């Protein structure tokens, strides 16, 4: 290889490892990379803030399984990007964040925007490092791709000292990275079969990352042969088709009580890929710690996750692909004691996701989601951040395909809008819809400009109840009647969309939604549908006043 600058070597590595997209906010700290990108076969998306840029990259990692790539500048650029890193960490998403860094010779003087990224990001990445020598770029980038995608995937942060990027080096490229699947042993599979032979009420719970349509199809075939009810973890609905007769629902916030009861009564729980973290475990109450209290088979790609919280009856260190490929080697008992359980679990799910919940006011988000579900193609990508508005999407939408859900299990607000933009940039042919609360939207709403800049007709449904509703709900439950720091005064979001060059709609009633949505699609522009939600309609089950009244009554009782 002829002499190349550090910047050129770096960009060449990204391409040879299969990167197609990079999301960035530029900085003078990494001009040599920007220059290398000038001629590179890599789609660059320029964003309006690093928070959104990093979330776009994270979303691309979630959808493709390949590391999302993000470039930011030092100091404030890097710290602005941190929510995206944290999401990748908690959601097990492969991500590589590159940070322009001060010159090597200025270190430790607190130079302009200097930070020690190993220290700053050390606890929320799989690896945080700095490249000191341009000749080592192929080695370190190769390792970054392997680290981000191996075991339990996650984020890697790499700082790039400014003059290292302009240095010339004569170094060979790396070979493209490989993902190593971890396979269960034949003994473990035999043990699993034995567990099913004596089980009376087994259930599977799917979670985590590293899934693919093929792996899901293999698990589906197994579930059919074993007549097994299959639940999915919090915000992992895309891991099993909702319309499949074995689908039992999702184990998240506001879970179907029947699903919860089924898991509590189960005598064999097969957890594949997930961690049974705080949300799915219902704040760590569903299973004992460390002894789960019922037979638990835990299949996870990271050996350190096995036994970290729960001591499983059978621990299998395997990736979803490695495990699911072996499922055809085991047989169900001839007359399973649980025959009919999958059908019953699915019926309970259908009833739960169809249950008509009357809500206060003129706009019913559940009805809107139900309408969208019949209107949208099966591969439409649905995005959201954090807030009670997301409950309606999670409960009433039917996720039937892999790579259709962008929702942070980490509960980060501001995710839906950038996630949608990242998704549409990568899959321009697919329909992308984001739900955002009035609070959530404005956390990264500035990147609506990015959707306009790249002509990405995403549709953003802003559910406006004039408050940080989730927190108000908790407030009414814990401190009824004492509203504090949760009220919002909002702009006209439809006018906001138009001011940015997009399409805007205002919707006050359920009936107005469908025509507004069709006009948004027809416009061919990025669109915002500003929906006015009665603040009383805080959950599908209870109004705000009911929550307050119940809390006051409980207080009065002492
Ligand atoms: C980045 C971030 N900041 C704060 C929170 C705490 N939080 C969770 S939900 C929420 C309110 C969300 O408000 P909105 O988007 O309007 O949705 P709503 O609950 O009103 O439907 C807040 C402040 C969070 N999860 N993430
Ligand atoms: Mg709100």
Image: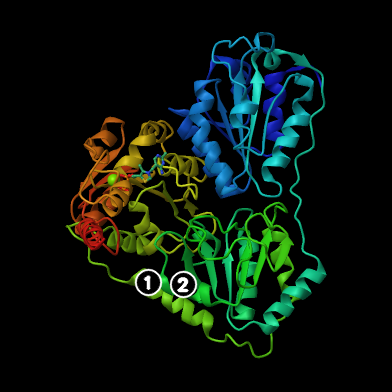
Residue annotated with mark 1 = 352
Q: Is residue 41 left or right of residue 367?
A: right
Q: Do the residues labelled 1 and 2 touch (CB within 8 Å)?
A: yes
Question: What is the x, y in percent for residue 203?
Answer: 57, 74
On the rendering, which quadrant does ligand 1 occupy?
top left
Residue annotated with mark 2 = 259
- Camera-side mark, 1 or 2: 2
Q: Quadrant of residue 412?
A: top left
Compared to residue 97, the image places residue 551 above or below, namely below
Question: What is the x, y in percent for residue 430?
Answer: 46, 50
Q: Which badge, 1 or 2, comes first in the chain's sequence?
A: 2
Compared to residue 36, the image places residue 97 above or below, namely below
Q: In this view, does 395 lie to the left or right of 203?
A: left
Question: What is the x, y in percent for residue 206?
Answer: 58, 63
Q: In which quarter of the image is residue 372?
A: bottom left
**Residue 462 shows in this picture:** no
């Amino acid at each position: 290889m002829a002499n190349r600058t550090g910047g050129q070597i770096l960009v060449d590595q990204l391409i040879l490892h299969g990167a197609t997209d990079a999301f960035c906010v530029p900085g003078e700290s990494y001009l040599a990379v920007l220059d290398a990108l000038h001629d590179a076969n890599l789609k660059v998306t320029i964003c309006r803030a690093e928070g959104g840029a990093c979330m776009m990259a994270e979303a691309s990692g979630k959808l493709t399984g390949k590391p999302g790539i993000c470039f930011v500048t030092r100091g404030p650029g890097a710290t602005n990007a941190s929510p995206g890193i944290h999401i990748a960490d908690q959601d097990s998403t492969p991500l590589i964040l590159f940070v322009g860094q001060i010159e090597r010779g200025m270190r430790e003087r607190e130079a302009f925007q200097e930070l020690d990224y190993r220290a700053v990001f050390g606890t929320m990445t799989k690896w945080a490092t700095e490249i000191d020598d341009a000749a080592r770029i192929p080695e370190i980038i190769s390792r970054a791709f392997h680290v981000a995608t191996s075991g339990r995937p996650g984020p890697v942060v790499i700082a790039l000292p400014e003059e290292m990027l302009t240095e010339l080096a004569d170094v060979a490229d790396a070979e493209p990275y490989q993902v190593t699947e971890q396979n269960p042993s034949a003994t473990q599979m035999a043990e699993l079969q034995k567990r099913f032979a004596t089980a009376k009420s087994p259930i599977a719970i799917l979670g985590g990352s590293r899934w693919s349509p093929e792996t899901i199809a293999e698990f589906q075939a197994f579930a059919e042969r074993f007549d097994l009810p299959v639940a999915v973890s919090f915000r992992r609905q895309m891991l099993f088709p909702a319309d499949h007769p074995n689908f039992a629902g999702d184990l998240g916030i506001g879970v179907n009580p029947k699903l919860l009861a089924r898991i509590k009564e189960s005598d064999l729980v097969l957890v594949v890929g997930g961690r049974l973290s705080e949300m799915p475990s219902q704040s760590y109450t569903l299973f004992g710690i460390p002894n789960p209290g019922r037979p638990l088979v835990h299949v996870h790609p990271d050996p350190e996750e096995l036994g970290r919280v729960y001591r499983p009856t059978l621990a299998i260190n395997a990736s979803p692909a490695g495990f699911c490929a072996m499922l055809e080697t085991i047989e169900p008992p001839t007359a399973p004691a649980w025959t009919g359980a999958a059908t019953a679990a699915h019926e309970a799910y259908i009833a739960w996701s169809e249950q008509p919940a009357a809500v206060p006011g003129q706009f019913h988000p559940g009805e809107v989601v139900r309408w969208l579900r019949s209107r949208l193609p099966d591969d439409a990508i649905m995005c959201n951040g954090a807030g009670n508005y997301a409950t309606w999407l999670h409960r009433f939408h039917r996720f039937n395909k892999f790579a259709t859900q962008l929702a942070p299990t980490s509960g980060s607000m501001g995710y839906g809008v950038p996630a949608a933009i990242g998704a549409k940039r990568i899959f321009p042919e697919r329909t992308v819809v984001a739900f955002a609360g009035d609070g959530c939207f404005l956390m990264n709403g500035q990147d609506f400009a990015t959707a306009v800049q790249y002509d990405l007709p995403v549709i953003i449904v802003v559910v406006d109840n004039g408050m940080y509703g989730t927190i108000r709900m908790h407030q009414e439950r814990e401190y009824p009647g004492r509203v504090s720091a949760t009220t919002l005064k909002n702009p006209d979001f439809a006018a906001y969309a138009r001011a940015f060059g997009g399409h805007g709609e205002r919707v006050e009633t359920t009936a107005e939604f469908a025509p507004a949505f069709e006009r948004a699609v027809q416009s061919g522009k990025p669109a915002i549908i500003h929906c006015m939600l009665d603040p009383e309609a805080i959950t599908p089950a209870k109004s705000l006043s009911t929550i307050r009244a119940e809390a006051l009554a409980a207080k009065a009782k002492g």
